[in-house]
Image (cartoon, grey):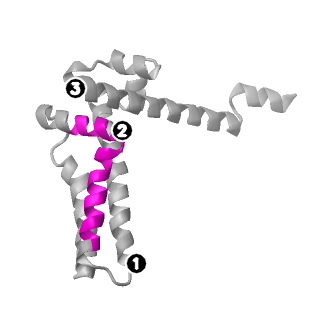
């Protein structure tokens, strides 16, 4: 009986794990909902209520998980940048294990991983809308795209090119 009381009172590790998992799901729903709203309506046209309504979360969840709308906007791009950059770098680094690597293979792989996010339906189209909207509205911190996406990909490409040549 005592153990059951502890479990239901919230002091049990299983409750903490379940609570953490539920929090991560809420955070992921907010990221997805925000990406959709920002892509469709832009930063200025999107309200916190639009996002939380689409995510089926409480309005205070944005402040709790991200700090505010601006930080959520940056988190959406951070999440997408990490996804795309990780796939690009992984594919280019895999070329370093190829015994007889040619320039054509490096360029073909680069073109493929560079264009892949554009063909990933519908997420890729949404990501492109986000990028294009931000190019016009510019709400990201200066240099974020360069630091998180371009530099790591370029470094992996340069390593692969160096091996091929």
| Residue at 33% in and 62% down | 89
* Residue 91 in which image quadrant: bottom left
| Residue at 35% in and 69% down | 93
- What residue span does the magenta drawing correspond to? 105-131
CA gap, disc 2 to disc 3? Answer: 16 Å
* Residue 53 in which image quadrant: top left
Q: Earlier in the sequence, mark 1 or mark 2?
A: 1
Secondary structure at numbered mark 3: helix
Q: Earlier in the sequence, mark 1 or mark 3?
A: 3
Q: Are marks 1 and 2 in contact (CB under 8 Å)?
A: no
Residue 97's disc is 1
Q: Are marks 2 and 3 in contact (CB under 8 Å)?
A: no
x and y percentages locating residue 142 in the rendered image: 15, 44
Q: Which residue is mark 2?
A: 123
Whether residue 79 sits left or right of residue 144 in the image: it is: right
Quarter of the image that includes the C terminus: bottom left
- Please determine whether, in this image, residue 68 is positioned above or below residue 125: above
Residue 125's disc is none
Residue 42's disc is 3
């Amino acid at each position: 009986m005592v153990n059951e009381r502890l479990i239901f009172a919230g002091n049990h590790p299983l409750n903490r794990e379940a609570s953490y998992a539920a929090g991560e799901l809420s955070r992921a729903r907010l990221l997805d909902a925000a990406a959709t709203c920002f892509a469709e309506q832009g930063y200025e046209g999107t309200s916190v209520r639009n996002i939380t309504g689409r995510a089926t979360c409480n309005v205070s969840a944005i402040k709790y998980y991200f700090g505010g709308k601006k930080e959520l906007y940056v988190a959406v791009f951070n999440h997408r940048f990490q996804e795309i950059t990780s796939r690009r770098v992984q594919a280019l680094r895999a070329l370093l294990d190829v015994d007889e690597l040619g320039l054509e293979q490096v360029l073909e792989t680069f073109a493929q991983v560079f264009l892949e996010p554009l063909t990933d339906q519908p997420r890729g189209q949404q990501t492109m809308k986000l990028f294009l909207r931000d190019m016009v509205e510019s709400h990201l911190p200066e240099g974020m795209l360069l630091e998180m996406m371009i530099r790591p990909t370029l470094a992996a490409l340069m390593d692969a090119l160096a091996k091929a040549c």
